[in-house]
Image (cartoon, rainbow, N blue to C red):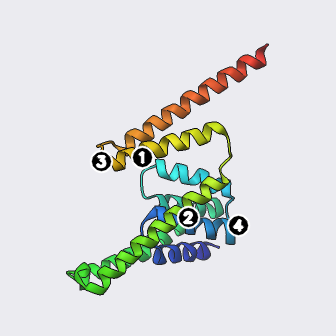
Amino acid sequence: MILEIFLVFAKIGLFTFGGGYAMISIIEDICVGQKKWITHDEMMNMTVVAESTPGPIAINCATFVGYKQKGLAGAIAATFGMILPPFIIIYLISMFLDNFMEITWIANGFKGIRIAVGILILDAAIKMIRKMKKKAFMIAIMICSMTVMLMVSFLSWNFSSITLMVIAGVTSLVIFAIKNASSKKGGAE
């Protein structure tokens, strides 16, 4: 099982370009759909936690899945599986090709890869939105967050994503505290 975990994440790390967000869709397809190692709800929760913890999101997700399957050994296998192939590829490129991106066919290939990465990220977002619990409040938070992100991007505002995450976290804690207080108050009567 440990070898299988390593090989699954090595394959994801080897054949997925574009970083963690592009890998989320692939991780979900394999770990939720094919292998049934985690549920979709666990995948959504894991993505949120992996996004808000230090380190690359895909590696954090791999570590979680590996840990859930086989504890510390599974976490180590999944993490090394995810990082080893890209590390070897980048190392070899840096050793043998000084001006790698100046090679015309490679530069054109990476232009095509950028489009595929965008599609993978959009696919992951659409899957999460479809499976999200359709509550008015959650939809309102999603729309507000998207609006702020688009305004920051299109208007070229200098706004830290960390600040946005802190605001979202504080808002969630305040809402949780209000709901918790109202449920205790309602239950006491």
Q: Amino acid at mark 1?
A: Met
| Pointer 2 or 3: first along the chain | 2
Q: Nearer the viewer, mark 4 or mark 2?
A: 2
- What residue is shown at x 50% (from left), y 72% (from top)? 81
Residue to which mark 4 is pinned: 36
Q: Mark 2 and mark 1 in contact (Cβ < 8 Å)?
A: no
Q: Secondary structure at mark 1?
A: helix
Picture quadrant of residue 130: bottom right
- The CA span between labels 4 and 3 is 42 Å
Label 1 packing within 10 angstroms: few (<14), some (14-19), many (20+) = some
Q: Secondary structure at mark 4?
A: loop
Q: Amino acid at mark 2?
A: Asp
Q: Amino acid at mark 4?
A: Lys
Residue to which mark 3 is pinned: 156
Label 2 packing within 10 angstroms: few (<14), some (14-19), many (20+) = some
Q: Secondary structure at mark 3?
A: loop
Quadrant occupied by the N terminus: bottom right
Q: Does residue 42 appear in the picture of this structure?
A: yes
Residue to which mark 2 is pinned: 123
Q: Nearer the viewer, mark 2 or mark 3?
A: 3
| Pointer 1 or 2: first along the chain | 2
Quadrant occupied by the C terminus: top right
Residue 115: x and y in percent read 42, 71
